[in-house]
Amino acid sequence: MNIFLISLISYFLGSIPFGLLLTKIFTGKDVREIGSGNIGATNVLRTGNKYLAATTLVLDVLKGYVAIIITKQYFPELIIVASLLVFLGHLFPVWLKFKGGKGVATYLGILFALSLQLSLLFIFTWVAVSLIFKYSSVSSMFSSLTVFVVSSIKEITLPLLARMTTEQTKNIDPSVDMSFVLFIFFILIVFAHRKNISNLKNKTEQKIRI
């Protein structure tokens, strides 16, 4: 019963299409008919309204964060389930015939709830890569890969560090297989960006313009 409840709540939160709703309410436009047709913050920015894009980003981050915080509080053993379902809810919302966003902001919200260090690493890497290449898709995929690799290295080295001190590992939740979750997220983010990968190969991918 608990797993069903958490799955339902997480998927519902993830499936709320804030980008679509905000652009419809405040501009009367359908963001799916603009730019890449995506409902995420990057495409909302292509409407020319930076405030709507920023609001979309914050709300998409929050829905990932809230889903994990609720689960950690009441059902910590179901964190992996909540993480995957809130993310899949954004990628495949039932309200939009399972055609959602890329899930990057929601992924960041999940990271914030699971690990502040990894979330800051993601932000730093995303900004650095975007400044160099000017492609949101490249930044998102590379950043999620970086987070996965760093998390894997951390999980390998933690047992060694634990021999020296338990203070550094006391806040690590043993019920969360971080590397496993982050690997799945990386694969899903690459899958969600498959059209962008094709555009990059054809040199038709749109660059970030602020």
Image (tube, rainbow, N blue to C red):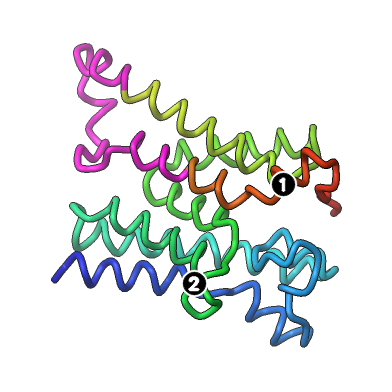
Please indicate whether residue 182 sits to the left or right of residue 28 in the image: left
Q: Which of the numbered marks, if any, corresponds to residue 61?
A: none
Read off the residue under disc 2: 93
Helix, strand or loop status at disc 2: loop
Whether residue 145 is situated above or below residue 91 in the rendered picture: above
Amino acid type at circle 2 is Pro
Please indicate whether residue 29 sits to the left or right of residue 109 in the image: right
Amino acid type at circle 1 is Ser
Taking the spot 49% from the left edge, 52% from the top edge, the residue there is 107
Magenta-tinted stretch? 156-185
- Mark 1 vs 2: CB contact within 8 A: no
Read off the residue under disc 1: 136
- Sequence-wise first label, 1 or 2: 2
Tell me where residue 203 sits by quadrant. Answer: top right
Using the numbered discs, state the Cα–Cα distance from disc 1 to disc 2 in whole angstroms: 22 Å
Residue 198 in the image: state x and y as whole percent: 72, 44
Whether residue 110 is situated above or below residue 56 in the rendered picture: above
